Image: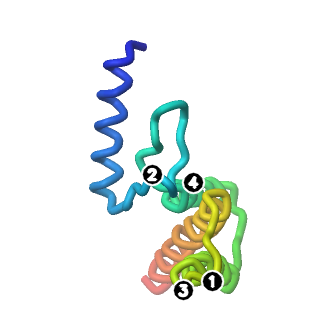
Amino acid sequence: MKKSTQRKIWAWSMRLGNRCGCHQREDRSFKIGEFQFPICSRCTGILLGQILSIILILLKVNIPIYLDFIFLAIMFLDWYIQFKKIRESTNLRRLVTGTLAGIAQINIIYQIIMFIIKLI
């Protein structure tokens, strides 16, 4: 693939990542070669977790709802520790905590939908 085509695809994906609400900070994003990911490492983890959660639901893997809230709390704690300048998070930690939160988000939505369906 030509370099100009790669740059056009990268520019388009960066605009898309920005529209999705990601801050896209270079220091908090992964890179492939000279190209920065269009979303930061935490957003990458969230997206990965959401995809993984859909797969788990299709495989009928049941994650207890309390675990979802623990997953969300872990990501919040990582953010809070960084926000309070206690300790800077790493991109790997952001990826892992984001993945856990993405799993939790989809699972909670799925549980709500299933609860509503059972009411009907």
Q: Which residue is mark 3?
A: 84
Q: Look at the image and tell me in which quarter the N terminus lies.
A: top left
From this view, report whether residue 65 is shown above or below residue 38.
below
Q: Which residue is mark 1?
A: 86
Task: Indicate the amino acid at tag 3.
Answer: Lys
Rate crowding at label 1 as few (under 14), some (14 to 19) or many (20 or more) other CA atoms within 10 Å.
few
Cβ atoms at labels 1 and 4 below 8 Å apart: no
Task: Indicate the amino acid at tag 4.
Answer: Leu
Q: Which residue is mark 2?
A: 26
Q: Which residue is mark 4?
A: 48
Where does residue 70 sit, x and y in percent of width and height? 67, 83
Give me the C-alpha separation between circle 2 and circle 4.
19 Å
Viewer-nearest of discs 4 and 3: 3
Horizontal side, residue 65 vs residue 41: left or right:
right
Cβ atoms at labels 2 and 4 below 8 Å apart: no
Q: Look at the image and tell me in which quarter the C terminus lies.
A: bottom left
Give me the C-alpha separation between circle 4 and circle 3.
27 Å
Q: Residue at x 38, y 24 (%)?
A: 6
From this view, report whether residue 45 is shown above or below residue 31.
below
Q: Residue at x 62, y 69 (%)?
A: 89
Label 4 secondary element:
helix
